[in-house]
Amino acid sequence: MIKVLLADDHSIVRAGLRRIVEESGEMEVIAEAADGREAIDQVHETLPDVAVIDISMPGLDGLEVVSQLRNHYPQLPILILTMHEEGQYVVRAIEAGAMGYLTKQSAPEQLVKAIRRVHSGSRYVTDDAAEALALRIARGAQGQSALDSLSMRELQVLRRLAMGHTNREIARAYHISIKTVDTYRSRLLKKLNLRNNADLSRFAIQNRLIEP
């Protein structure tokens, strides 16, 4: 049996995913988590064979969870679960160390297959995500957008600022100084040609980095 960890902040979603996983007859859910920090703690405690991580969770987001787990458990296959199909997110997930990328819309049909694939050591992305990724790569550096130019940490700070987190909360989440957060904020405003946090929020919503 493949031991699976499910991390998603919506209990109804977790229940649906658990049913899909356990009805396969070859997998079992040994742990669940409702936020990023709990996901990391559950991996430490239960040592799953595969971790299925939602990209948008309170506390540490999915990308940060993947980065931290990759440092401690480099062999753990991680499957990112998300509402987003954009190449932007596929690239970020793979860069962070995820082995697979699956949208929630396709999860009912593809979740078991995706878990099986990453558990075997292969990568898995949906057809739509693969196409978006290919188009983003094809654009190359010359076609790079302002969003593409952001580093992983800049993207994480952007999302948190857009969700209304204070500099102090962001500093605590990422173990950096408040001054460093302010530096990231200034860099984001300059790179994206924006004026304030309200503009950052609108930009994040328009680019589907957060839900409105």
Image (cartoon, grey):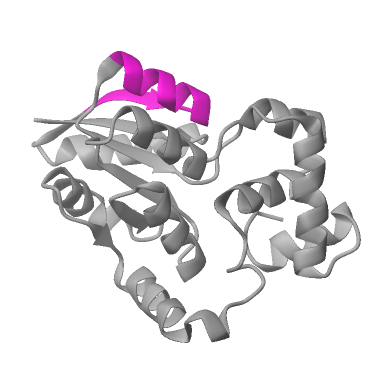
Residue 49 screen position, x and y as percent = 19, 31
Q: Quadrant of residue 145?
A: bottom right
Where's residue 151, x and y in %? 59, 56
Q: Is residue 120 above or below residue 33?
A: below
Residue 166 in view: no
Q: Is residue 39 magenta?
A: yes
Taking 119 as reference, is 146 left or right?
A: right
Q: Is residue 91 magenta?
A: no
Left/right of residue 121 with respect to residue 183 in the rendered view: left
Q: Is residue 30 above or below residue 194?
A: above
> Which portion, as a residue range, is magenta?
29-45
Q: Residue furthest top?
A: 45
Q: Nearer the viewer, residue 62 or 144?
A: 144
> Who's the residue at 30% across and 72% down the image?
127
Image position of 183 (left or right of 131)? right
| Residue 7 visible at all | yes
Location of the C terminus by quadrant is: bottom right
Where residue 186 appears, x then y in whole percent? 83, 53
Residue furthest right as drawn: 195
Q: Nearer the viewer, residue 132 or 30?
A: 132
Q: Is residue 128 above or below residue 204?
A: below
User: In the picture, residue 132 is in which quadrant?
Assistant: bottom left
Marker count (numbered): 0
Q: Nearer the viewer, residue 7 or 173?
A: 173
The quadrant in which the N terminus is found is top left
x, y percent for residue 25? 9, 36
Q: Residue at x 62, y 32 (%)?
A: 174
Residue pictured at 14% horizontal, 34% vertical = 27
- Residue at position x 17%, y 39% from top? 23
